[in-house]
């Protein structure tokens, strides 16, 4: 099924059209599969002139990684609003291109470099994907493909992503696909605000740092060849790999397209993924657990000690995320219980006893955050500190504070107790742990504040510290 016309219903019947949003709209696929061939189709940079006239164009580039997708068909549409303020794709505005061997693509979209674009990749008989699951990728009908080798994708495989044209870069992954599906449920359609919120929501689901879905996902089969890769980018790539790993773990799923179909159907119908699963659908906990296992397995495939250490951090993050998800829903797995639970405050591993102190400001309705005794956590990486806390139950003035009123937390840290210049935001009130990694040598100091949904902020808690 294809969707080439304008959507008239803003709510309700939005489950299936999304996956075929750009398919079959008079596609004229270029035979090019590298940046040089694509560049030959139009000259100039952003806002440059096409060879066929004076119409400006904007460059849209990126990569399709689940693992690397080769010879996939990439198309793009601008997202425009109608008179009612509903955003949907316009007619096909760029000639389709194929991804290169490294999954990259580049195309030109007619018009200026303003607004947002929806980008899609779909598979045909020529499309191949690199197996990024250790030790192998199972295929329907038996047989498996070794880590790092390629295999064909069925025609039902589709990934979507969206981005601001001024940024020029859109990465296509299972996580970006879920974000677009979530944004589609908005009363405004695929508006910039809905897409921004959806990307942030998906990052929160999987315990990813804010903005991680805009990072270039590395090829997990070529980690030793990377000169520099961040822990956040590794975590995104491994989370995406976990979708394919689930095909190995459950006979219900014959392909990655089946897994993505199950997930997007859940998101389109309810706006979320089943947390712990019901035996039929895939669950958030399934993906997080698979990501933790893949991070562990990848550690034996790399020679770089730096990359290996970063993989340890990714594994730890996913284990902690699984614990958080499982504990919140009362189904904690004892095998993942690697930390000592704390209540009522903030602590870091290896710090000294800090006692308890109320913090907050007066007459502002802000919240209170209370630190307690610290916990030694031997499994925390050497260059990291594990912070844990419990959400406050009351405001400073004594009024009760429900979980629904808490927007999240902000961790501030630095190399001096009076210079906590670096901050990390936690946009999920249910999260009570955070691993701060990639810390240099020296003493690091940490404090936390609570943020409520009205924009009120507590003062920082008592400062605690850890020697790295």
Image: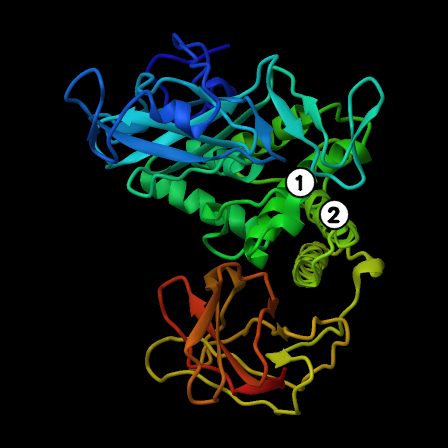
Residue sitting at the far top = 26
Q: Position of residue 164 (x, y in %)?
A: 33, 40
Q: Is residue 463 visible?
A: yes
* Residue shown at the point (25%, 35%) measured from the top left: 45
Q: Nearer the viewer, residue 434 or 215?
A: 215
Q: Position of residue 338 (x, y in %)?
A: 79, 67
* Residue shown at the point (65%, 20%) measured from the top left: 153
How has the structure been colored for display?
A: rainbow
Q: Position of residue 305 (x, y in %)?
A: 71, 63
Q: Nearer the viewer, residue 153 or 6?
A: 153
Q: Nearer the viewer, residue 59 or 344?
A: 59
Drawn side of residue 327 relative to residue 69, left or right: right
Q: Earlier in the sequence, mark 2 or mark 1?
A: 1
Q: Residues within 10 Å of mark 1 (few under 14, many from 20)?
A: many
In the rendered view, tell whether residue 19 sits above or below residue 289.
above
Q: Are marks 2 and 1 in contact (CB under 8 Å)?
A: yes
Q: CA distance from mark 2 to mark 1?
A: 8 Å
SS for callout 2: helix
Q: Nearer the viewer, residue 155 or 90?
A: 155
* Residue shown at the point (43%, 20%) measured from the top left: 97
Q: Which residue is mark 1?
A: 241
Drawn side of residue 425 relative to residue 205, left or right: left
Q: Residues within 10 Å of mark 2 (few under 14, many from 20)?
A: many
SS for callout 1: helix
Q: Position of residue 291 (x, y in %)?
A: 70, 48
Q: Which residue is mark 2?
A: 294
């Amino acid at each position: 099924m294809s969707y080439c016309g304008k959507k008239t219903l803003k709510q309700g019947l939005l489950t299936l059209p999304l996956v075929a949003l750009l398919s079959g709209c008079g596609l004229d696929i270029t035979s090019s599969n590298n940046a040089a061939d694509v560049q030959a189709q139009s000259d100039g940079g952003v806002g440059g002139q096409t060879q066929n006239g004076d119409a400006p164009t904007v460059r849209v580039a990126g990569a399709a990684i689940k693992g690397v997708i080769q010879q996939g068909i990439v198309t793009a549409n601008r997202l425009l609003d109608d008179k009612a303020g509903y955003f949907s794709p316009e007619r096909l505005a760029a000639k389709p291109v194929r991804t290169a061997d490294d999954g990259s693509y580049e195309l030109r979209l007619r018009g200026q470099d303003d607004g947002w674009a929806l980008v899609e990749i779909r598979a045909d008989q020529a499309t191949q994907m690199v197996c990024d699951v250790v030790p192998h990728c199972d295929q329907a009908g038996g047989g498996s493909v070794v880590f790092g080798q390629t295999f064909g994708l069925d025609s039902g495989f589709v990934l979507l992503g969206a981005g601001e044209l001024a940024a020029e870069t859109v990465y296509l992954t299972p996580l970006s696909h879920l974000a677009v599906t979530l944004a589609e449920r908005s009363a405004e359609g695929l508006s910039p605000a809905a897409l921004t919120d959806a990307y942030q929501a998906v990052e929160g689901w999987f315990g990813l740092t804010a903005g991680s879905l805009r990072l270039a996902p590395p090829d997990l089969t070529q980690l030793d060849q990377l000169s520099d890769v961040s822990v956040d980018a590794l975590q995104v790539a491994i989370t995406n790999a976990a979708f394919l790993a689930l095909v190995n773990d459950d006979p219900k799923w014959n392909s990655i397209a089946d897994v993505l179909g199950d997930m997007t159907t859940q998101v389109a119908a309810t706006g979320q993924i089943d947390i712990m699963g019901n035996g039929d659908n895939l669950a958030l906990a399934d993906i997080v657990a698979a990501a933790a296992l893949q991070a562990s397995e990848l550690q034996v495939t790399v020679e770089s000690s730096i990359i290996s250490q970063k993989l340890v951090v990714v594994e730890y993050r996913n284990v902690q995320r699984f614990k958080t998800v499982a504990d919140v829903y009362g189904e904690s797995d004892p095998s993942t219980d690697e930390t000592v639970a704390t209540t009522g405050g903030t602590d870091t591993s290896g710090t000294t006893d800090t006692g308890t102190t109320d913090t907050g400001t007066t007459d502002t309705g802000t919240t209170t955050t209370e630190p307690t005794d610290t916990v030694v956590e031997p499994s925390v990486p050497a260059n990291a500190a594990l912070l844990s806390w419990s959400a406050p139950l009351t405001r400073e003035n004594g009024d009760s504070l429900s979980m629904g009123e808490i927007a999240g937390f902000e961790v501030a840290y630095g190399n001096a107790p009076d210079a906590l210049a670096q901050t990390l935001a936690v946009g999920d009130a249910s999260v009570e742990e955070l691993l701060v990694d990639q810390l240099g040598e020296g003493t690091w100091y940490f404090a936390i504040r609570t943020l409520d949904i009205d924009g009120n902020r507590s003062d920082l808690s008592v400062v605690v510290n850890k020697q790295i």
